[in-house]
Image (tube, grey):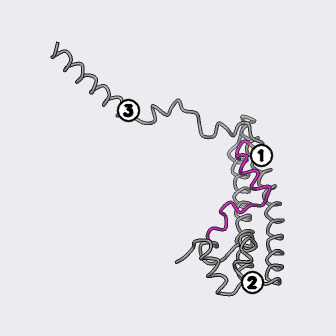
């Protein structure tokens, strides 16, 4: 009886090791895709959050290169106006920069949403061609680059309105200390 218990325990351990060493892909083959939720969204190739951000002209991290290298963005400058000691004139100029950026970003965001919808429809038709897919994705890439440029240019413009001390304080308040 003791030998049987030892043999059973040993065999159980071997089976556990064998199962544990199975490729992770075998286990994940039955997990739903992380994209499955997008089938019911307005544009299948975008999440609802992405559509919302594009429609609102939000930055979505597109100006990170500027933000992390001492080029503050107009939205956050307006949020921190009192802490930074911005003058009324600075606030007015930064508001104008922000409004222009927002207007351009919203328009570009709508164009991106339309192009993403076209791309999704192309595949939904069941007959996407390499030529059309390449044309649409090339157009999308250019528009996404233009959207990023809109946000980055606003950071450049807004920075011109600040003193070196205000930029340092902005960096400190945002946690971007060197």
Structural distance between the alpha carbons of marks 3 and 1: 39 Å
- Eyeballing the image, is 95 above or below 117? below
Q: Position of residue 88 (x, y in %)?
A: 82, 82
Q: Secondary structure at mark 2?
A: loop
Label located before the other in sequence (3 or 1): 3
* 2 and 1 marks in contact (CB < 8 Å): no
Query: How would you rate the neighbour count of disc 3 (Cα within 10 Å): few for under 14, some for 14-19, many for 20 or more?
Result: few
Residue 11 in which image quadrant: top left
- 166 horizontally vs 5: left or right: right
x 21%, y 17%: residue: 5
Structural distance between the alpha carbons of marks 2 and 1: 39 Å
- 15 horizontally vs 120: left or right: left
What residue occupies the far front of the structure in this picture? 82
- Eyeballing the image, is 73 above or below 140? below
* 3 and 1 marks in contact (CB < 8 Å): no
Structural distance between the alpha carbons of marks 3 and 2: 60 Å
x 58%, y 71%: residue: 175
- Eyeballing the image, is 116 above or below 151? above
Q: Position of residue 107 (x, y in %)?
A: 83, 60
- Eyeballing the image, is 178 above or below 107? below
The tag on residue 117 is 1
The tag on residue 161 is 2
Q: Quadrant of the N terminus?
A: top left
* 3 and 2 marks in contact (CB < 8 Å): no
Residue on which the image places disc 3: 22
Q: Secondary structure at mark 1?
A: helix
- The segment highlighted magenta reads 44-66
- 146 horizontally vs 35: left or right: right
Q: Nearer the viewer, residue 140 or 42?
A: 42
Query: How would you rate the neighbour count of disc 2 (Cα within 10 Å): few for under 14, some for 14-19, many for 20 or more?
Result: some
Label located before the other in sequence (2 or 1): 1
């Amino acid at each position: 009886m003791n030998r049987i218990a030892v043999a059973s325990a040993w065999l159980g351990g071997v089976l556990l090791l064998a199962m544990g060493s199975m490729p992770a892909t075998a286990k994940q083959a039955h997990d739903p895709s992380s994209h499955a939720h997008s089938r019911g969204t307005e544009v299948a190739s975008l999440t609802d959050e992405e559509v919302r951000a594009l429609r609102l002209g939000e930055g979505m991290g597109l100006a990170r290169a500027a933000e992390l290298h001492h080029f503050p963005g107009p939205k956050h400058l307006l949020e921190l106006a009192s802490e930074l000691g911005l003058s009324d004139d600075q606030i007015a100029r930064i508001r104008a920069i922000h409004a222009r950026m927002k207007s351009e970003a919203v328009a570009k965001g709508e164009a991106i949403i339309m192009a993403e919808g076209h791309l999704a429809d192309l595949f939904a038709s069941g007959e996407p061609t390499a030529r059309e897919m390449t044309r649409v994705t090339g157009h999308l890439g250019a528009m996404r680059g233009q959207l990023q440029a809109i946000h980055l240019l606003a950071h450049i413009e807004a920075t011109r309105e600040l003193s070196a001390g205000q930029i340092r304080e902005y960096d400190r308040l945002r946690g971007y200390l060197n």
